[in-house]
Amino acid sequence: MADSILRWGVMSTANIGRAAVNPAIQASSNGTLVAVASRDATRAADFASLHGIPRHHGSYEALLEDPDVDAVYIPLPNSMHRDWTIRAAQAGKHILCEKPLALSASECLEMQAAAGENNVRLMEAFMYRFHPRTQRVIEMVREGVIGDIRAIRSAFTFRLTRPDNIRLDAGLGGGALMDVGCYCVNVSRTIAGTEPVEVQAFARWADSGVDDQLTGVLRFDDDLTAHFDCSLTTERCEMFEVGGTAGHLRIPGAFLPGTADASIHEHRGRNGETEHVVPGADEYLLMVEHFADAVLSGGALHYGAEEAAANMRTIEALYASARDGGRPVTL
Ligand SMILES: NC(=O)c1ccc[n+]([C@@H]2O[C@H](COP(=O)([O-])OP(=O)(O)OC[C@H]3O[C@@H](n4cnc5c(N)ncnc54)[C@H](OP(=O)(O)O)[C@@H]3O)[C@@H](O)[C@H]2O)c1
C-alpha cells in the first residue's frame, strides 16, 4: 500500500457516490479515487470518464482483484452490503460501507469478524457524525448545558417520487426506517449515550411491502425517551432536538447541513434563545479523511461495526413492534 495516500475504488455508479462521497475522496488530502466498478462495463467507463476516475471495471469482482486499490467504498443497495463487504475483506481491501451497514445486527457482526480475520478496517458511512456541529451538540449535552436530558425528538423525511427507487424495494432492504430513520435511531442513541431498553413503532406499509412512513419511540430508562418520525412520503424535514431540565437544543438541517455555517439553537424559557454558529464543514470529506487516516496510521476508527450492530438491533426491534401493531418490544 502507498503509505501516505489511500487508493480508493468505488463499487457501483450510485447516486450518493457521484454526488457526495466520490468528490470527497477526490478532494481528500490523504486519498485518491483510482477506480470505479459497475455491473455494466459501459456504465463504468462512462462514469469514469465523466468524473475523472483513472480506471474502470465491468464487475465488482474485478475491482476487488485490482492490486492498485487499497480500500473500497460500498454504496450498494442495503441488502448487498453484507456480502460485498465480506468479499472485499477476503480480498484484503479496507471498507467504508454505506449506512445502514447491513440488514441486521448479526450481519454487522459477521462483517466485523470478516474484517478482523483479514486484518482490514471497516466503518459505516454515517457522515453526519463527523460534522463539528454534531460533535458540539454532544459536548454541550455532556457538559450539562441544558441540565439533565429527558427527551430527544428527531425527524428525517423526504418525498420519494420514483417508484423504481431502491428504497421502495423490500428485497433490496428498502424502507423509511432503513433509509432515513436509521439516522434518527443513531442520533438518539448517540445523544443518550446508552442503548434503549424498550421500543415501540407504528408504520404505514407501501404496496411493495416496505414501510414508507414510521414513527418510533425509544425508552432508555424511566427518565429519558426519544421519539422520531421518518418517511419517504412527506416533504423534506431533518432535525433533532434535545430537551433538558434547564433548556433545550434545536438542530435544524441536522444530517445534511451542506458546507455553510451550521447553527445550534439553545432555548431557555419563553424568550431566551441563543444561536451557536459552528463554521461550515464538509462532513463527507471529514469522514473519508478520518477513515483513510486510521488505515494509513493504524489508528483507531471513531466508529466500529459493533456500533452499527447496536443501531441495527434497535432498528430490528422497531420493525418487530411495527409489524405487530405497535406492541412494545424490550431489548
Ligand atoms: N450517507 C449518505 O448521505 C447516503 C445518501 C444516500 C444513500 N446512501 C446509502 O447509499 C446506498 C446507495 O444509495 P443510492 O441512493 O446512492 O442508490 P442508487 O443510486 O440506486 O445506487 C445503487 C447502485 O448499486 C448498484 N446496484 C447493484 N445491484 C443493484 C440492484 N439490484 N438494483 C439497483 N442498483 C444496484 C447500481 O450500480 P451499477 O449498476 O453501476 O453497478 C446502482 O447505481 C444505500 O445503502 C443508501 O442507504 C447514503
Image (cartoon, grey):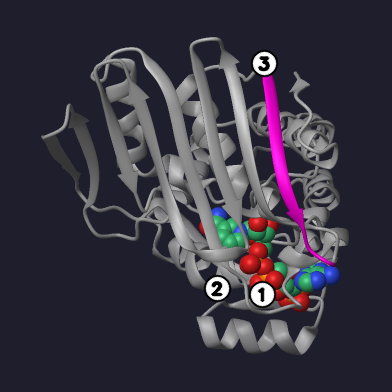
Q: Is residue 141 above or below residue 98?
A: above
Is 13 on the left or on the right of 54, as rendered? right
Query: Dividing the picture into quarters, in which one does residue 273 lie?
Result: top left
For the residues bearing labels 2 and 1, Cβ distance under 8 angstroms: yes
Whether 198 is among the magenta residues is yes
Q: Amino acid at mark 3?
A: Val
At mark 2, the secondary structure is helix
| Camera-side residue of 301 and 212 | 212
Residue picked out by circle 1: 13
Instruction: Give me the C-alpha separation between circle 1 and circle 3.
Output: 39 Å
State the predominant SS element of the stretch in magenta. Answer: strand
Q: Quadrant of ligand 1?
A: bottom right
Instruction: Give me the C-alpha separation between circle 2 and circle 1.
Output: 7 Å
Q: Residue at x 30, y 39 (%)?
A: 250
| Camera-side residue of 230 and 54 | 230
Q: Does the closest atom of ligand 1 sit within 8 Å of the Cβ of label 2?
A: yes
Q: Does the closest atom of ligand 1 sit within 8 Å of the Cβ of label 1?
A: yes
Binning the other alpha carbons within 10 Å of mark 1 as few (below 14), some (14 to 19) or many (20 upward) gives many
Q: Residue at x 15, y 41 (%)?
A: 275
Q: Does the closest atom of ligand 1 sit within 8 Å of the Cβ of label 3?
A: no
Q: Amino acid at mark 1?
A: Thr
Query: Percent from the top left, x then y, of residue 212?
Result: 70, 59
Q: Is residue 93 above or below residue 308?
A: below
Q: Residue at x 42, y 56 (%)?
A: 256
Query: Percent from the top left, x then y, of residue 258?
Result: 34, 60
